[in-house]
Image (cartoon, rainbow, N blue to C red):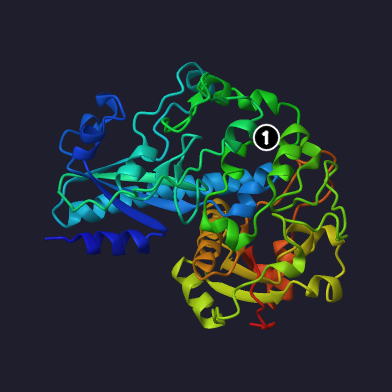
Amino acid sequence: MITKSDVVSYAKSLGAGLVGFAPVERWREKGDLHPNFFPDSVWPETKTVIVMCVPSLTPVHDTKITRLHRSLYNITNQRLDEMAYMLSVYLNRNGVPAIYAPRDGYATDGKILKENPTAAFSHVWAGYYAGLGTVGWNHTLLTRKYGPRHRLVSALSAQSFEGDPLIEDNLCTKCRVCEKACPFESFSSPQDGVVSNRVSADMNKSRCAHKYEHFEGMPYQHCGFCIKTCPVGEDLRLFGSPSTREYFEAHHDFEKWTMGVGGNIDVAGKADGLNEERVLVRGVNKAGLSAKEDTAVSFDAIEKYAQSLGVDIVGFANASDWGSEVNVPSELYPAAIWPMARSVIVLAVRAQNGERDAEARILDEAAYRLAAWLCEQQCPSIHLPSDTGDEDYIAGASMPLFSHECAAKLAGLDSGGIRAVSVLTTLDLEYRKN
């Protein structure tokens, strides 16, 4: 008989940062949702819901660069569905009937979503019942590790597993910053002003669903302020936390958006230089954030993990090399994108004719998972997607955000027959040619 420990180990091997188990009885005991949204209404055989969580890397989530934000969203979505499917197959292979609920579970057609902004199953409440966190004022699951900056998916199992204990203390402080920061006023407090007896704010889901209309014609096409502003989460300490004032300036005037990856790139797509005023990312300066001194992540460990993700070649370069070793515009320096970067890890696969999309998918997922793995080792890191072109979201841009080809050359890789992607990290890695 397969054990709970077996399931956790397998889920972690798939890339889950958090895993929790929720007996189906908890939905009835708590009574927070309509019975239509109970797991056994989705699949009557359900005995336990297994919830998996992956992080949204905080500086990438903070970025004003839409393609970077969209890349993170797409990579995590794709990975979550694959993880849930693979976990279900793993359970089936070991004699446990199981299916999965997709990570979104709502209509992807914009018109339908605006008319009926409702999902078939709530991973947020499943995560709460699985002991991963508590439900916040902004209707997200707040976890100790990531706050609300994560993505969730669930597998429904016909075998009963012991449930994980619920988190007794409410992680939400009811500060209501999420409500105040929402550019679309989607959240509201009760008229009597009493919030202590409320789990979440009243939410106008239609306003939230119509948010993209607000960004029409702008170089920024994403939001997430209710998630960015939340003060809960160890990830904020890992990456350094911005002041709430920065977020409020940005949500009123998007040209003042200076947080996250590419925060020092203006509307015209040109870096603002590395002067002290604009080198701030999430409230800390370049010298103020690094991997913990006692953190030891070796070349070999990074290479071994990256190759387990399907990467053929791994290279390393110092971020400072861009200023001394290559003749490229300063806008393409790693520090122009993320001033915390001290080293660049280049992941590459050998290029095959007609396999461009498949190679990009392998590389993007590997870069995200490596960055997330390094963060687990307390080494702040971010990934840059294989497609760093910016013609559709930074007005007037005449160059890509970053050159993976240049990074590969500086890492000593032959860029002629490979496709590459990059991870920026605060680790001080010595230069090593492959």
Residue denoted by label 1: 221
Q: Residue furthest top?
A: 115
The front one of 343 and 255 is: 255
Q: Position of residue 331 (x, y in %)?
A: 83, 57
Q: Residue at x 60, y 44 (%)?
A: 228
Rendering quarter of residue 31: top left
Give the residue displayed 25% in from the left and 25% down from the top: 35
Q: Quadrant of the N terminus?
A: bottom left
Q: Which residue is at 50% across, 49% downward? A: 147
- Which amino acid type is marked by label 1? Gln
Position of 383 relative to 171 (above/below): below
Q: Is 63 in front, or is 407?
A: 63
Q: Nearer the viewer, residue 406 or 83?
A: 83
Left or right of 407 in this view: 308:
left
Q: What's the residue at 65%, 55% (across, down)?
A: 241
Position above or below: 423 against 182: below
Spot occupied by residue 208 in the image (x, y as percentages of width and height): 56, 26
Callout 1 environment at 10 Å: few (<14), some (14 to 19), or many (20+)?
Answer: some
Q: Nearer the viewer, residue 4 or 389?
A: 4
